[in-house]
Amino acid sequence: MGGLEVNKGIAAVLVAGIAFFLTGFLGTLLVQNKVPEKVAIDIQMPQAAPAGGGAAAPAGPPNIDNLIATADPAKGEAFTKTICVACHSFNQGGAAGVGPNLYGVLGAKHGHMEGFNYSKALASIPGPWTYEALNKWLYDPAAYAPGTRMTYAGIKNNQQRAEVIAYLRSLSPNPEPLPPHHDDTAAATPASAPAAGAPAAAEGGLPPIVPLLAKADPAAGEAYTKTICVACHTFTEGGPAGVGPNLYNVVGGPHAHMAGFNYTAGMKAKTGPWTFDELNEWLYKPAAYVPGTRMIFPGIPNAQTRANVIDYLRTLSHNPVALPTTEAEAAAPPVAK
């Protein structure tokens, strides 16, 4: 390569550099990079999650100290006997179920029952069960102790929570003082009094199921199962067993209908499919229908609620059985539509 060609190459590089510099300089003069005083579109970003991961903590329930001081513990007892007994016992020295015995829980440490296998989420919470802690726990167990094995969704009604806490307070030879600035005599209603409006079991046997099923509301039955029964059962097709078996296709199916589930001998001894009458008897008093059952839920005393639940269970099938129109049909194996 001759000297002329080298000089031409160097000149080309210099010209390109000068052109690049002049272009940038002119661009700076023509385009003013001024930051606007206000953004054109104000996008509200969500707040960062609290340290440790997970979603932001919910606001939580309101303070219910005033309600606790005037709450009726008998109503709280009635609530626990309808809902909570599925997993807990309440008598002094009572055995654990799915959950621990709750005698003397108020004022005791979070993992208060010796020998019970608490989740790490609950056992690691320091301090005793105070009124405030019970209020938050009963409102939303999963929010109070993330990772808890307690599947119950919580009591959203403030008055009901107060009544349950007032009842738990009574489960002690020396009940904890009421929250400050309240008179202890306000909550002196005996815990043994029957709850106002509590449905009574039918006297002299169960009422006929056919008229109850005729006006049953399966949506109400589903709502009931999602409040209570989900603590032990699943309802989706192919769902896993919990403490109890999956209940998809149970109506018209064999008594021990879920393959692989460890049913009690009493349940396995029941022959034939689940009829409407048998489901009615079972849901009324499981321990009477199958002596020795491990089902600790005491039953559904309200006849229409039982019918609602049975009608919901009937819908859990690709080919639901027909509702009975006579008592003879209710006692016979259900027939597909």
Image (cartoon, rainbow, N blue to C red):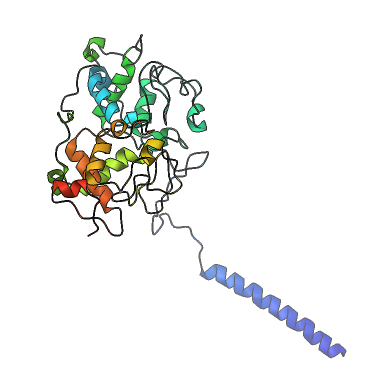
Is 128 left, or right, of 164 in this rendering? right
* Residue in the image at 40% along x and 48% along y: 258
Figure quadrant of the N terminus: bottom right
In the displayed structure, 129 sits above or below 217; it is above
In the displayed structure, 326 sits above or below 152; it is below
Q: Nearer the viewer, residue 8 or 75?
A: 75
Extreme residue in the right direction: 2
Q: Nearer the viewer, residue 170 or 143?
A: 170
Percent x, y of residue 246: 38, 46
Percent x, y of residue 196: 16, 24
Figure quadrant of the C terminus: bottom left
Is 295 left, or right, of 31 in this rendering? left
Is 178 left, or right, of 260 in this rendering? left
Residue 71 appears in view: no
In the displayed structure, 95 sits above or below 261; it is above
Q: Nearer the viewer, residue 199 or 17?
A: 199
Percent x, y of residue 266: 37, 36
* Residue in the image at 41% along x and 50% along y: 239
* Image quadrant assignment for residue 165: top left
Residue 66 appears in view: yes
Percent x, y of residue 217: 18, 47
* Image quadrant assignment for residue 293: top left
* Residue in the image at 29% along x and 31% along y: 288
How many numbered circles are shown?
0
